[in-house]
Amino acid sequence: MANKWLTSTLLATAVAAGSYYLGKDENREKLSHNYNRLKSKMKKETKEDYDPYYAEKLGHSDPQDIGDNSMVDEGAVFSVNYYNENLKK
């Protein structure tokens, strides 16, 4: 009898704590995001895992790839311009 009471009390406490934690939208979103990340890691479904292009391309810019080089070159300038334009509005 005491075992049954202890089990039901622990279960009710766990349900109450879970309901309280998941009552906030940000906690539900965080939990969902972490669950999806863990699931994709376990299945090896991240972009880096199934696309060899990323493993080859990362950190090794091809001098003949004009589009990639100009994107990297303009990267910092783009963010500064974007910030300045939105600041003026």
Image (tube, grey):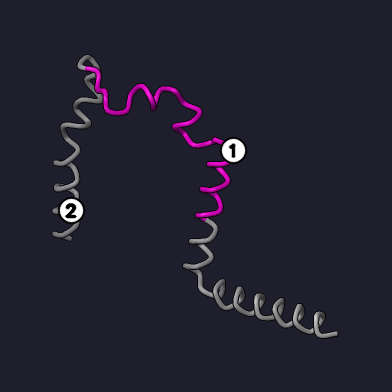
Tell us which disc is closer to us: 1 or 2: 1
Q: Main secondary structure of the magenta part?
A: helix
The residue nearer to you, when weighing 14 against 48, is 14
Secondary structure beneath dot 1 equals helix
Mark 2 Cα within 10 Å, few/some/many (few <14, many 20+)? Answer: few
- Left or right of residue 72: residue 50: right
Give the x, y percent position of residue 75. Answer: 19, 38
- Give residue 83's mark: 2
| Quarter of the figure with residue 54 | top left
Give the x, y percent position of residue 28. Answer: 53, 65
Q: Do the CB atoms of the residues marked 1 and 2 lie less than 8 Å apart?
A: no
Mark 1 Cα within 10 Å, few/some/many (few <14, many 20+)? Answer: few
In primary-sequence order, the first of circles 1 and 2 is 1
Give the x, y percent position of residue 48. Answer: 44, 32
Q: CA distance from mark 1 to mark 2?
A: 38 Å
Is residue 53 found inside the magenta-colored segment of the image? Answer: yes
Is residue 13 found inside the magenta-colored segment of the image? Answer: no
| Quarter of the figure with residue 70 | top left
In this figure, which residue is indicated by the disc labeled 1?
Answer: 43
Residue drawn at point x = 19 percent, y = 49 percent: 82
Residue drawn at point x = 56 percent, y = 71 percent: 22
Does residue 84 lie above or below 9 as drawn? above
Amino acid carrying mark 1 in the image: Lys
The residue nearer to you, when weighing 51 against 10, is 10
Magenta-drawn segment:
33-62
Does residue 39 lie above or below 33 as drawn? above
- Left or right of residue 68: residue 1: right
| Picture quarter with the C terminus | bottom left
The residue nearer to you, when weighing 20 against 29, is 20
Residue drawn at point x = 64 percent, y = 80 percent: 16
Residue furthest to the front: 2
- Left or right of residue 55: residue 17: right
